Each structure stands twice: as C-alpha cells, then as structure tokens.
Image (spheres, rainbow, N blue to C red):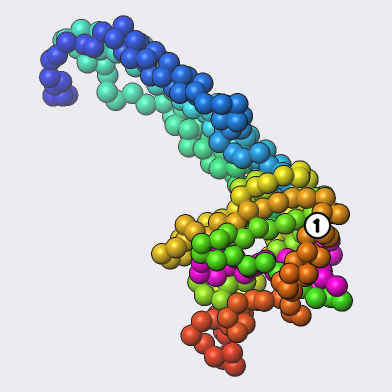
C-alpha cells in the first residue's frame, strides 16, 4: 500500500491526559455551583420533580435510559481509548496495519444497537400508554382552551347547579389553574385558532391543543404546591406569554376557590370554548363538514 502519513511529532500522552483532567474538573465544578435545588435537578438529570402518579413512570424511563446510555458510553469510550493507546503509531517509519477486520465483532456491533433500540422502544411505548391512558370516570373534568395568547380554564359543571366556573388570562396577566390534590383530573384541550401545546413540567406531561379536535389526558397530582405551566408549541408572536400558574390544593380549598369564582361572576352555563365553537376551525363555517377531524 502506498499510504504515507505526513511525519510529525507525536502529541505527548501526558499533555492529552492533563487536558482531559482539566475538562473533567471544570465539568465537576460547574455541577457543584448553585443551590440545593440546582443540585437536586442535576441529580434528577435535569428533570423537574414529578408530582403526579404517571409522572413517576416517565421519570423512571428517563433515568434508566440515561443509565443505559452512560453504560454504553463508558464501554465505547473505554474501547476507543484502549485502541488509541494499544495500537498507536510507535515510530515514524511504520503505520499500523489498516485492513484488519473481525467478523464476530462486526456482527456484534450490528446486532447490539438493534437490540438496544428495541428495548428503548418497548419501554417508551409502555410508559406512553400509561401517560395517555384515560379512565372512564375521572373525579374532575377541566376544559382547557388555548387561544392566542392565553388560556381559559373551565371547571366544567363543577359549580352550583351544574354551572361552570372559569378563569381566563390575558396576554398581560397570566391565569391560575387550581387543582385538588389526590383527585384524578381530565383535561379536554380545545383551540379555536392555531395549534398550542398544554403542559406542566411538574406533571412531566404535555399535549398538543389542536383546532378541530379535542385531545385529552388525565393526571392525579399528589403533592400540594405552586407550579408553572406554559404553551410548548411555537404558536405565534406572543407564544412566550402563554404562561400559567398551577396551584395544587386540598379539596376544601378547591371547593372554596370555585365558590369564590362564581361569587365574582366568573361562571357560565356552558364551558367557554373560545370563538363560536372550539371544534370549528377558523376560516370554516360551523356547518362545514370537517373531514380532516379525527374526533
Ligand atoms: Cu400557544
């Protein structure tokens, strides 16, 4: 073979080792900065703390996936380092043989990733099924409307006489979604305009809000407290203002809150779905047959 490598001085192993050490130290130190909450977040591999029953399953999937990826990474990096050192060029006059192959090894590294993808796929589908499962009779139903540029939360038929207390935000004032603790709640997601995405990081759950169909998911919050939610789909100019607060409270506080909303006049006979009808797509008449709808 006429392959000729240009001659140059080899990089000393010591210099490479000290470079690796500096990078590792910097990564360690950057992980040490910040307060206890940051440290917790790092321990959870950047996931928020899950506060729902299904959130825990999602979190476990995340953790075990990272573990599998790290084990794979360590083996691969170890092999690379070993090969680099063991088969390095030892003098200026010879280069290592460039044509070695090993059939069993090649079969192994073809099959191993396929097996890994199958395992990841199986667990992802299993957890996803759990996250989007709907029980037939949830304790609470909330009709959520995402519209440019805020949210309306309808506490459907939970007011006196089956009325619907609601709260609605504006682009300058974000609304608060109040939920009872340890009760299953179903969100029916409506959009009268464009595709939004309703999500609460602490639930480890979000779902598209699509005009012309009603997506649904259920959660059971298990920890009282204040959380944040937002629109996760770039829906236009003021997408970034589509924030909302989430308060998980006791059943008594929840009932008091709904009564309070009704007292202040925030109550309707029917859930307010935005536009004339959230299941009518903008630009279509209500009588138009919506063939694209999957609902
Ligand atoms: Cu949006």
Q: Where's residue 48, x and y in %?
A: 61, 40
Q: Quadrant of the N terminus?
A: top left
Q: Relative to 18, is 113 on the left or the right?
A: right
Q: Is residue 184 visible?
A: no
Q: Where's residue 113, x and y in %?
A: 51, 37
Most foreground residue, 80 or 150: 150
The residue positioned 68% from the left and 42% from the top of the image is 50
Ligand 1 under 8 Å from disc 1 Cβ: no
Residue 78: quadrant of the picture: top left
- Furthest toward the front, the residue is 264
Q: Is residue 18 magenta?
A: no
The residue positioned 51% from the left and 82% from the top of the image is 282
Q: How many C-alpha atoms fall within 10 Å of the one at disc 1: few (<14), some, or many (≥20)?
A: some
Most foreground residue, 212 or 15: 212
The residue positioned 27% from the left and 23% from the top of the image is 98
Relative to residue 119, is residue 22 depicted above or below? above
- Furthest toward the bottom, the residue is 287
How many numbered marks appear?
1
Q: Is residue 143 visible?
A: yes
Q: Relative to 87, is 160 on the left or the right?
A: right
Q: Where's residue 189, x and y in %?
A: 64, 67
Most foreground residue, 94 or 157: 157
Q: Secondary structure at mark 1?
A: helix
Q: Is residue 155 magenta?
A: yes
Q: Relative to 94, is 106 on the left or the right?
A: right
Residue 84: quadrant of the picture: top left
Q: Relative to 85, is 114 on the left or the right?
A: right
Q: Quadrant of the C terminus?
A: bottom right
Q: Which residues are magenta?
A: 133-160
Q: Which residue is mark 1?
A: 254
């Amino acid at each position: 073979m006429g392959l000729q490598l240009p001659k140059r001085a080899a990089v000393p192993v010591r210099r490479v080792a000290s470079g690796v050490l500096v990078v590792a130290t910097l990564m360690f130190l950057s992980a040490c900065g910040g307060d206890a909450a940051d440290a917790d977040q790092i321990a959870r591999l950047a996931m928020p703390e899950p506060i729902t029953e299904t959130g825990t399953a999602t979190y476990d999937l995340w953790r075990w996936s990272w573990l599998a990826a790290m084990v794979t990474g360590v083996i691969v990096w170890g092999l690379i380092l070993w090969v680099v050192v063991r088969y390095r060029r030892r003098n200026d006059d010879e280069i290592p043989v460039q044509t070695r192959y090993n059939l069993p090894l090649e079969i192994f590294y073809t099959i191993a990733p396929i097996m890994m993808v199958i395992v990841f796929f199986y667990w992802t589908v299993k957890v996803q099924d759990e996250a989007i499962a709907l029980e037939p009779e949830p304790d609470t139903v909330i009709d959520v409307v995402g519209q440019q540029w805020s949210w309306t939360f309808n506490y459907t038929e939970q007011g006196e006489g089956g009325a619907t207390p609601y709260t609605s935000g504006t682009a300058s004032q974000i609304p608060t979604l109040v939920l009872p603790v340890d009760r299953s709640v179903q969100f029916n997601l409506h959009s009268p305009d464009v595709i939004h995405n309703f999500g609460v990081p602490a639930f480890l759950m979000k779902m598209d809000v699509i005009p012309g169909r009603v997506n649904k998911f259920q959660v059971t919050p298990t920890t009282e407290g204040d959380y944040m939610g937002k629109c996760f789909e770039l829906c236009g100019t003021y997408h970034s203002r589509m924030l909302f607060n989430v308060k998980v409270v006791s059943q008594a506080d929840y009932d008091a809150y709904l009564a309070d909303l009704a007292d202040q006049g925030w109550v309707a006979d029917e859930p307010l779905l935005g536009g004339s009808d959230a299941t009518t797509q903008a630009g279509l008449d209500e009588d138009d047959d919506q063939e694209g709808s999957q609902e």
